[in-house]
Amino acid sequence: MRRSMEVFFKEWMTAADRLPLLVRGARQVGKTYVIEQFAATHFENVIKINFEQQREYLPCFETLYPQKIINLIYTMTGTTIVPGKTLLFLDEIQECPNAILALRYFYEQMPELHIIAAGSLLEFTLREAEFRMPVGRVQSCYLKPLSFKEFLLALHKKSLVEYIEQASLQGTFEPAIHDLLLMHVKEYFVLGGMPAVIEQYLQTQQFEASQIRQSVILNTYRSDFGKYASKSNIKYLQTLFDKVPGLIGQHFRYVQVDPHMLARDIKRALTNLKDAGLIYTVYASLAQRLPLLSTIQEKKFKLLFVDLGLVNCTTQLSAEILMQKDILLVHQGALAEQFVGQELLAYAPPYQDGQLVYWDRAVGSSTAEVDYVIAVDATIYPIEVKAGATGRLLSLQRFIDEKSSPFGVRISQKPLSFEKRILSIPLYLISELPRLIRTC
């Protein structure tokens, strides 16, 4: 299962001023797997230490001197660490905060050694008041669930990925390929991008077996609550976690979670789930200037879940029904909005965690909203996830007129086209959005 993160790893590996790399992301997104795949291909040997399972290595990092750490690891493993040929992989590094601090000294005193660290629930360690993150001495990157293109590669559909990457407004529309790609989009709606779920599907070719694996992942997330919340706060986490999939695409209001819970308790749970990588906030932005985040309204936001397949699992909509329905209309379009948001996050630069915004305008009785707003080459573009006809994209047209945007983007099941200041992009081409915008 190939991941685009490996391209970033290659660039990091050969960089002249290379920093130790810290791979961040939610549990079950495949951090360990992608690092091990990369290491097996590009290094003569790998020393992997999993601090969660191999706690005997914790004392090695009671010192912050790299040479002493290396000597202790050599004594315990019997494996010589050779800079340039060996990768030192520190997994579940949140279990050893001293190892995070040591990354700074490896950069300063042993920069020729390749080190990759990874951790789940890492944000909680980094946010502790007494913890001093080695700023400027460690490079972070963020791994998310498989994108749609990575999903196609996992299904051994490389030719379809090549078709996507070559698609253009000047190209010939191929109805058969268009329909095939939309069918795979529907598969992605059912399965999502969690590697273990996709692997289960590849082995069994059964949606039901994959949905069982999704339930296991959801329960794994729930079992983690005790690691980062007190007993009194766990109930808020559980309630919010179970409610979020049903709130996607809506303006978030605390009372929607539970009218009997205090907003401050829900807000704390919201922050915890964000730190765990299980939810993303999509803030309303005035979209007046760049950067878009400079004009967000922090009290007005929507939520996305970590993975579309897990959202679908919680809705308990059968795979057979989903494969037959108009996916833009399922659950009032919430699944389609999750898909688009998840894709936009997946194709963000790996060194950015990703932050999405939308546009919401209310003046008197007049309201308008577009699902997402992005910037490409210092120009702002609105995006609507829509099933209706182009002429009914009233909010998109209003944004274009008010913000003097060159044109708007409509994402739907319709073929690629450009007319009446609307770039219409099918769901499977979100990865190519910046490239296609530049050609208009």
Image (cartoon, grey):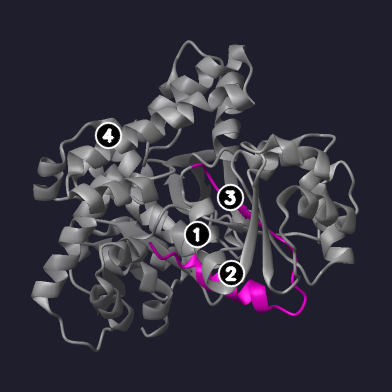
Quadrant hosting residue 340? bottom left
Residues at marks 1 and 4, CA–CA distance in whole angstroms: 23 Å
Q: Amino acid at mark 4?
A: Ile
Residue 24 lies in the magenta stretch: yes
Question: Is residue 194 something that shows in the picture?
Answer: no
According to the image, label 2 marks what residue? 9
Instruction: Give the mark, 1 or 4, whose residue is nearer the N terminus.
Output: 1
Left or right of 339 on screen, residue 281:
right
Q: Secondary structure at mark 3?
A: strand
Front-most of residues 75 and 261: 75
Question: Residue 100: x percent and y percent?
Answer: 77, 48
Q: Amino acid at mark 1?
A: Val
Instruction: Give the mark, 2 or 4, whose residue is nearer the N terminus.
Output: 2
Q: Which of the two discs, 3 and 1, sits closer to the camera?
A: 1
Quadrant hosting residue 432? bottom left
Q: Which residues are magenta?
A: 1-27
Question: Is residue 130 something that shows in the picture?
Answer: yes
Residues at marks 3 and 1, CA–CA distance in whole angstroms: 34 Å
The quarter of the image holding the C terminus is bottom left
Point out which mark residue 296 bears: 3
Q: Amino acid at mark 2?
A: Phe
Front-most of residues 213 and 377: 213
In this rendering, the answer to whether 337 lies above or below 257 is: below
